[in-house]
Every structure is written in C-alpha cells, then in structure tokens.
Image (cartoon, rainbow, N blue to C red):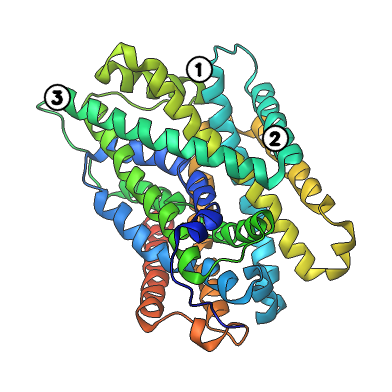
C-alpha cells in the first residue's frame, strides 16, 4: 500500500486532528509542569537548549509512528511483530514495567494536586484511587470519542492560560535575589537532573506507539483515512505545540522561582501548594484560582491519556504475541487498565511517601529504555513491511542515528557519574 499523495485541505485536517492533541496531552504533564518549571527554577533560562535539543533528537521516533500507520493503515505494533518476536516481546516487557511506574507517578502527582486545590483532607492513597476510578469511568463509558473531545478542550484552555500566566509573570519581572549563587549544572546532581528531564521530555519514547493506535481509532470515528500530509500536520500540531509550551513553563519557573531561595518539597501535597502559591505570589493573589486551573488541567490531561495509552499499547502488543486472544475484543483493554490501576494504587499506598523519588525513578527508567524503543521504531520504518516510497528520507535517518547516539552517550555518562565516581 502506497502512501497517499493528497494535498492538505481543511476538511481532511478537521477529520484527522485528534491523535496529535492526545499526544500533547500526554506530553504536557509532569515533564512540563514539574520538570520544565523546576529547570527554570533551578537554572533560570540556561536549559532552553536542552529542551529544544531533546525535542529535536526524539522527533524522528514519534514521526515514525505516524509514518507507518499512514502508509500501511495498520498499528506500528504490527510492524514490531513483522520485525520478529524479539521486537514485540522487548516492547511488551519494557513497556509493562514503565507502565506501572509511570501510572503511579502520574496519578500520585495529579491526586496530590486535586487534594490541595479542592481542600481534600484525606489519605493520599484514597485520593489516588478515587481519581483513578473517575478516569476509568470516563474511558470505559465514553471510549475514544470522549477522550478526543475532552482533550481538545483541555489543551486549548491549558495553552491559553499558560501563555497568559507567563506574560503576567514577565510583566511583574524576575524575582531573583541579586546575590543569588547559581547552582552548578555539570556535577552529579545537575547531571542527574538533566537525565530526569530528558527521560520525560517531551514524553517517554515508548509512548510513541500511542498516536499510531489513536490514529486508527480516529479513522473508525470519522470513517476517513487521512493522507500522510494530513497525519503529519496533526503530529506537528501536537509535537511542536508541546515543545512551545515547555518553554513557557520553563520561563514561568525562571521568572517566578529562580533565585528566591525556595526549595521544592518531596511531599506531593506541599509541592502542589508551593507550585500554585509561588506562581500566584508573583503574578498576584487574584491569579491563584487561574494558576490552580492551569496546574490541575495540565496533570489531569496527562493522567487521562496515560491511563488510556498504556492499556491500549499493552493490549495491542499482547494481541500480536497471542493472536488467538482477539476473540476477547476490548475486554483486554479493560483488564489492562484495571490491572495497572491496582498496581499503581499499591505502589502509591505502600512505597511512595516521597513523590520526588518516584518521579526520578520513573523518568530515569524511561530514559534508560529510550534507545531501545528508538532503535525498534527506526527498524520498523526501514523494513520491508512499509512501501519503499513511504520510508523516511536520508536527513531523517541521519537525525535518527544522531538521536540514538545522543541518548546512549548521556546514559553512559550518567552511569559513569552515578556508579563509577
């Protein structure tokens, strides 16, 4: 099947847009709200280069997911299977573990925010399980259609409020103390933070599978199969939009928190309070509710997409490994969602009194596994299962190898500084 050459048109774009917005919702979460803000709070505007660089080097591996589905009409997981059992089994095993940890991290952060914003004086584990229940109900009842509509509204509101908050902070001026000593970047602590930032910026590479699966759901919803140009427009809208907002979150951290002497608490509830109050303290007390809405929408949108994305990708990989399970239909998706929710709840209840430690572990795990997922995505779009005229151009192949080398070098440096010095 050849990649369609239709030109862009508004009707086609309207029917196509959706998976890219969902991707943005998944990306604009802990990596932006927590890590981009913290990057600005700790290092001012110095790490803009890293955010831009990691978006550049991860770009091919997310684009490949769209490319494969556009050219074949199939999930990229089918491409994994055609590469060999090693590829699909590797994805399943690594994704299984990252799914559990990332589920717990995202739900923990979101539930702590909800507890602070809605003044809920109850156990964190109860808040987390309640939030999980609400999201599961939304996904089980509304399915993809509800997810698609909800995310388009939330991302629009989030984008406008974030940009508005940044310009209010810019108008108020930086809050840094004149004699504030800037922390070193190239020491063990600084390097660890760089790895953590890259692990979830813009989002883990194993999540590149999700847009492929969402694209197929969008096609079922609209009964329209988009051209590659239309799919890439949707992809670019989400990918570059999330990169754009990452810079604004970093700017908010730099303007509002850098040089103030405030440190982030490891308690999720206290951290949530710090985040909202520090922003509103600089911008003005009138903005407290607005900042609260921005913060909550940011994490809730991520929780919604993560809780849909991981069960969907694990379901898809299991069906490639055991095709006979197709007779169970969507029941596998529901079972994975429930299993991951239970596992995440257990982690939150017994092992995560320190939110920062959980987030660091989740992001480092995502970063260490990134080159594996990147290599498999590269192999898929250069395999015989994709038409010759649909394979990536030479510049994109070169960028892919540069990205893989970039990720590997940082992993080696991280291992050296962490275990050998």
- The local crowd at label 3, few if under 14, some if 14 to 19, many if 20 or more residues have their Cα within 10 Å, is few
Q: What residue is shown with label 3?
A: 177
Residue 342 visible to an observer of this rendering? no
Residue depicted at 61% across the width and 52% down the height: 98
The secondary element bearing badge 2 is classed as: helix
Q: Which quarter of the figure is the N terminus placed in?
A: bottom right
Q: What residue is shown with label 2?
A: 138
Asked where in the image residue 346 lies, by quadrant, the reply is top right
- Whether residues under marks 3 and 2 lie with C-beta atoms below 8 angstroms apart, the answer is no
| Spot occupied by residue 251 in the image (x, y as percentages of width and height) | 26, 37
Q: What residue is shown with label 1?
A: 117
Image disc number at residue 90 = none
The secondary element bearing badge 1 is classed as: helix
Does 234 appear above or below 258?
Answer: below
Residue depicted at 56% across the width and 66% down the height: 226
| Spot occupied by residue 148 in the image (x, y as percentages of width and height) | 59, 45
Q: Considering depth in this image, is 383 or 93 the residue closer to the camera?
A: 383
What is the total number of numbered labels drawn onto the structure image? 3
Rounded to the nearest angstrom, the CA distance separating label 2 from label 1 is 21 Å
Residue 386 visible to an observer of this rendering? yes
Kindly report which numbered mark, 2 or 1, lies closer to the viewer in this rendering: 2
Asked where in the image residue 181 lies, by quadrant, the reply is top left
Does label 3 or label 2 sit earlier along the sequence?
Answer: 2
């Amino acid at each position: 099947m050849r990649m369609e050459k239709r030109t862009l048109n508004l009707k086609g774009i309207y029917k196509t847009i959706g998976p890219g917005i969902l991707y943005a919702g998944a990306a604009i979460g802990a990596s932006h709200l927590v890590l981009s803000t913290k990057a600005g709070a700790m290092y001012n505007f110095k790490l803009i280069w890293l955010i831009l660089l990691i978006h550049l080097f991860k770009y091919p591996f997310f684009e490949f997911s769209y490319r494969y589905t556009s050219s074949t009409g199939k999930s990229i997981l089918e491409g994994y299977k055609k590469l060999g059992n090693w590829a699909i089994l590797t994805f399943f095993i690594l994704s299984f573990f990252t799914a559990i940890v990332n589920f717990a991290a995202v739900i923990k952060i979101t539930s702590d925010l909800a507890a602070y914003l809605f003044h809920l004086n109850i156990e964190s584990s109860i808040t987390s399980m309640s939030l999980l229940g609400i999201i599961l109900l939304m996904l089980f009842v509304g399915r993809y259609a509800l997810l698609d509509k909800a995310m388009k509204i939330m991302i629009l509101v989030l984008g406008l409020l974030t940009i508005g908050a940044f310009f209010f902070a810019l108008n108020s001026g930086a809050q840094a103390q004149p004699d504030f000593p800037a922390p070193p970047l190239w020491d063990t602590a600084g390097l660890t933070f760089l790895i953590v930032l890259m692990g979830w910026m813009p989002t883990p590479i194993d999540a590149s599978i999700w847009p492929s699966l969402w694209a197929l759901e969008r096609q079922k919803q609209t009964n329209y199969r988009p051209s590659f140009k239309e799919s890439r427009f949707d992809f670019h809208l989400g990918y570059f939009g999330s990169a754009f907002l990452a810079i604004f979150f970093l700017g908010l951290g730099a303007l509002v928190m850098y040089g103030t002497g405030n440190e982030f608490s490891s308690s999720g509830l206290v951290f949530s309070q710090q985040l909202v109050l520090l922003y509103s303290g600089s911008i003005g007390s009138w903005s407290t509710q607005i900042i609260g809405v921005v913060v909550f929408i940011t994490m809730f949108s991520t929780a919604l997409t993560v809780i849909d994305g991981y069960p969907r990708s694990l379901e898809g990989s299991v069906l490639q490994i055991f095709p006979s399970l197709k007779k169970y239909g969507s029941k596998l998706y529901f079972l994975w969602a429930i299993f991951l929710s239970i596992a995440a709840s257990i982690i939150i209840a017994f092992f995560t009194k320190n939110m920062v430690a959980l987030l660091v572990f989740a992001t480092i795990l995502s970063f260490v596994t990134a080159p594996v997922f990147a290599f498999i995505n590269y192999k898929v779009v250069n395999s015989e299962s994709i038409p010759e005229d649909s394979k990536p151009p030479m510049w994109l192949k070169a960028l892919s190898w540069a990205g893989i080398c970039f990720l590997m070098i940082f992993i080696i440096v991280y291992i050296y500084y962490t275990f050998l010095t």
